[in-house]
């Protein structure tokens, strides 16, 4: 009995010690690799707030906007200066994996960070001002056929980045020469959308989450969504595919972390993202912003990202963006 009691005491001590040594978040920061207003900013601010509201982190999450290089500035900062920082989350999307596939991050690769999770799927949209001459996607395509360079598309990514790829895919699906389409890059979706509203560009190839509030307010007209089926949040807006243009662009919303993050901290954040994704609060936000359910975390997400980088590399080659 004495041996059993001593064994129980040891088990309790080690259990308490394990609890004490388990990772506890403190001073959590989320980096949005673009200016305020775009998809990465939305990801950081929305999920960051839920992490606090759901009691997963003890204090509000600090959001830091770090634009530049289509996410490359933030990526380099995280890899070179924040190694092992278990309280740092970085917003990511296919824009991140696309630039990695094209070798646009200064020699860094997807293996240089820890991929955490994706919590929802956004979809590309083709949006114009409400006073634009194009009431339908067909009308816009018709004018592009007359003079592809006369209409400026303004996106929140660099040339060859995610928003530009939407334009290239749409042009290719319409039988146009993608290289003749005029594309103006901005440092984020918010800046590109502001440029559209200001009349500096005529078309915004953004995402549903970036434009839906402006659409509901009557400030933009969405001509089409780049999804397989109509979005529940935009049931009256046709897909490009149903209009005869096979252009689909799904945008997962998620995060990566710095290299060298300890396994216990990484496991904590994977579980944290699962809790956010399963919450009714996130379901409501997701539906309101036009996102579809989509979750991958931990090892499954890392494998998904690796394959997407490979797929994007082949797609970029086929469009003549890389050799």
Image (spheres, rainbow, N blue to C red):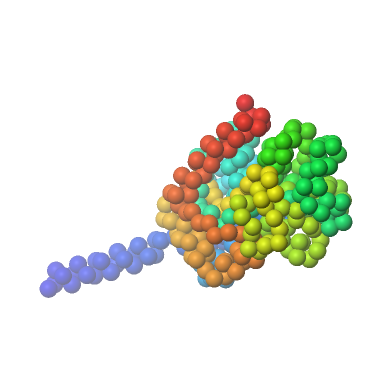
Question: Foreground: 139 or 304?
Answer: 139
Quadrant of the rendered structure where residue 160 is? top right
Would residue 256 be found to the left or right of residue 132 on screen?
A: left
The residue closer to the viewer here, 274 or 82, is 274
Q: Is residue 269 above or below residue 144?
A: below
Please provide percent x and percent y for residue 224. 72, 53
In this rendering, position of residue 309 left or right of residue 246: left
Which residue is at a point 84% across and 36% down the rendered structure image? 147
Q: Quadrant of the N terminus?
A: bottom left
How far from the left and from the top, in percent, is residue 288? 65, 66
Q: Which residue lies furthest to the top in this view?
A: 323
Q: How many labels does the image show?
A: 0
Q: Is residue 175 visible?
A: yes
- In percent of the image, x 64 and y 57: which residue is there? 230
Q: Picture coordinates of residue 139 (x, y %)?
A: 81, 47
Q: Is residue 114 visible?
A: no
Report the quarter where the C terminus lies: top right
- Which residue is located at x 83 percent, y 42 percent? 143
Q: Which is more toward the observer, 52 or 124? A: 124
- Residue at coordinates 81% horizontally, 38% vertically from top-left? 145
Given residues 310 and 290, the one toward you in this image is 290
Pinpoint residue 173: horizontal percent, then vertical percent: 68, 39
């Amino acid at each position: 009995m004495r041996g059993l009691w001593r064994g129980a005491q040891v088990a309790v001590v080690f259990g308490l010690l394990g609890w004490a040594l388990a990772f506890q978040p403190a001073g959590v920061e989320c980096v949005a690799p673009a200016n305020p207003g775009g998809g990465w900013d939305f990801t950081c601010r929305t999920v960051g707030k839920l992490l606090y509201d759901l009691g997963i982190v003890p204090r509000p999450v600090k959001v830091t906007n770090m634009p530049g290089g289509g996410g490359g500035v933030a990526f380099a900062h995280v890899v070179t200066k924040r190694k092992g920082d278990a309280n740092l989350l970085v917003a990511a999307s296919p824009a991140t994996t696309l630039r990695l596939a094209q070798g646009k991050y200064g020699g860094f690769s997807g293996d240089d960070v820890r991929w955490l999770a994706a919590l929802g799927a956004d979809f590309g949209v083709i949006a114009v001002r409400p006073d634009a001459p194009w009431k339908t996607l067909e009308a816009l395509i018709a004018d592009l056929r007359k003079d592809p360079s006369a209409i400026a598309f303004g996106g929140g990514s660099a040339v060859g980045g995610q928003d530009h790829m939407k334009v290239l895919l749409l042009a290719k699906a319409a039988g146009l020469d993608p290289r003749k389409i005029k594309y103006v890059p901005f440092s984020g979706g918010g800046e590109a959308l502001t440029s559209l509203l200001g009349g500096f560009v005529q078309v915004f190839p953004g995402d549903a989450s970036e434009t839906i509030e402006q659409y509901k307010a009557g400030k933009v007209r969405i001509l089409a969504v780049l999804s397989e089926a109509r979005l529940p949040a935009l049931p009256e807006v046709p897909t490009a595919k149903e209009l005869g243009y096979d252009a689909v662009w799904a945008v997962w919303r998620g995060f990566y972390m710095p290299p060298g993050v300890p396994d216990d901290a990484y496991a904590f954040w994977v579980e944290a993202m699962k809790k956010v994704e399963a919450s009714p609060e996130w379901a409501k936000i997701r539906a309101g912003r036009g996102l579809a359910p989509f979750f991958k975390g931990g090892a499954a997400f890392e494998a998904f990202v690796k394959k997407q980088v490979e797929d994007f590399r082949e797609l970029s080659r086929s469009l003549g963006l890389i050799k």
